[in-house]
Image (cartoon, helix red, strand yellow):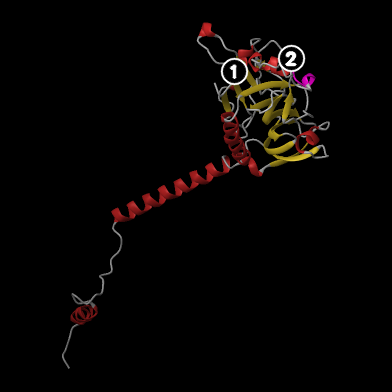
Amino acid sequence: MQNRTPRNADRALAKRLAPTRGSGRMHARGFSYVEMLVALSILAMVATIAVIAYSSILSHRPASIQSEEVIIAGNALLSFYALNTDRISVARAPSYSAAAQAESMREQLYEDVNSAVAVFCLGRIGVNQVRMTNITVPSSFDGRTITNPMTFRALLPNLPNYTATTSNAVRARNSTLFIIQPSASISQLAVRAIYETDMIATITPPGVYATVRRYVGSTLTSYYHVFYPSIGGAIATNTFSPLAMFYPRDLSVGRPKPFTLLWWPDPASPRLPAISSGSDSRDGFTNMAGQSSFFFVIPTFPAL
């Protein structure tokens, strides 16, 4: 037997266990310091991004999952939705599901205006009980005399429901937008659709219930609603004003065609605007800036 020293035996065993070139076996080795540093840096970056994303989701999660059962006085819900109750479940603002419904109504409004011959917005004193598809007018009626919302108001069978004002700003809590379409009758105006906006202080919990609805005659075709809760125990008041502003024809300022500015409450906004401190109706426009993405410029006579 060949005599080997312990050192020579260790070398022989190491040589026998070492993989031969081309054998397909990989050399085993550990990570270098630089590789470990890079790996730990990447892991730290991923963890930081995950924490930031999770925090963002928690702080900006859609509030549409939060809903309230609100109580509204009177017969408002009966008029709005044919519901014989004073309670309704509604998403709290901000609500992105309600905002999606509002976007759908925006597209419907554009379609209605494109088919209209006239559009008039009136402030309303209370809830509406009369919704018509036709407005009767005298056979000698000349449509060219209806040049503004107040002259249109005189034609309505329920005109006391609508505010009579010399101001062109609709500062009532509620409003109705009439979409008038072409009519084959000389004694009737055809109503394509009616859009109603109502802002109502709730009994409990304290806040403002905002609803926008579209009707064809007495039939509710679409709507959205949202609840703005009172903040810090403040008294629930409606500060979403004006709902609309009419601009008549005025050639002296280069305005050959009349139009209306219209605002709908924005479900994606967390609160209503601040109270306007000015006496001029135009001062309220400052409060509306940035308050709602549902802002419209509507020609009074779209076909012209």
Q: Is residue 169 left or right of residue 160?
A: left
Picture layout, residue 295 above or below residue 5:
above
Is 13 one of the magenta-colored residues? no
Quadrant of residue 121 within the rendered picture: top right
| Residue reaching furthest to the top | 252
Q: Counting other residues with Cα less than 10 Å from the Cα at mark 1, is it few (<14), some (14-19), or many (20 or more)?
A: some
Q: Is residue 153 left or right of residue 266?
A: right
Marks counted in the figure total 2
Q: Secondary structure at mark 2?
A: loop
Mark closer to the chain start, 2 or 1: 2
Q: Secondary structure at mark 1?
A: helix
Give the residue pinned by disc 2: 164
Examine the rendering and report whether any part of residue 105 can be seen: yes
The stretch in magenta equals 159-164
The percent coordinates of residue 189 (x first, y second) are: 69, 25
The percent coordinates of residue 139 (x first, y second) are: 73, 19
Q: Nearer the viewer, residue 260 or 178?
A: 178
Give the residue pinned by disc 1: 285
| Residue reaching furthest to the left | 2
Report the amino acid beneath label 1.
Answer: Phe
Report the amino acid beneath label 2.
Answer: Ala
Q: Counting other residues with Cα less than 10 Å from the Cα at mark 2, is it few (<14), some (14-19), or many (20 or more)?
A: some
The percent coordinates of residue 154 (x first, y second) are: 74, 16
Is 163 one of the magenta-colored residues? yes
Q: Nearer the viewer, residue 59 or 254?
A: 254
Dot 2 and dot 1 residues touching (CB under 8 Å): no
Picture layout, residue 7 above or below residue 81:
below
Q: Residue at x 52, y 46 (%)?
A: 54
Q: Residue at x 30, y 60 (%)?
A: 31
Quadrant of residue 3 within the rendered picture: bottom left
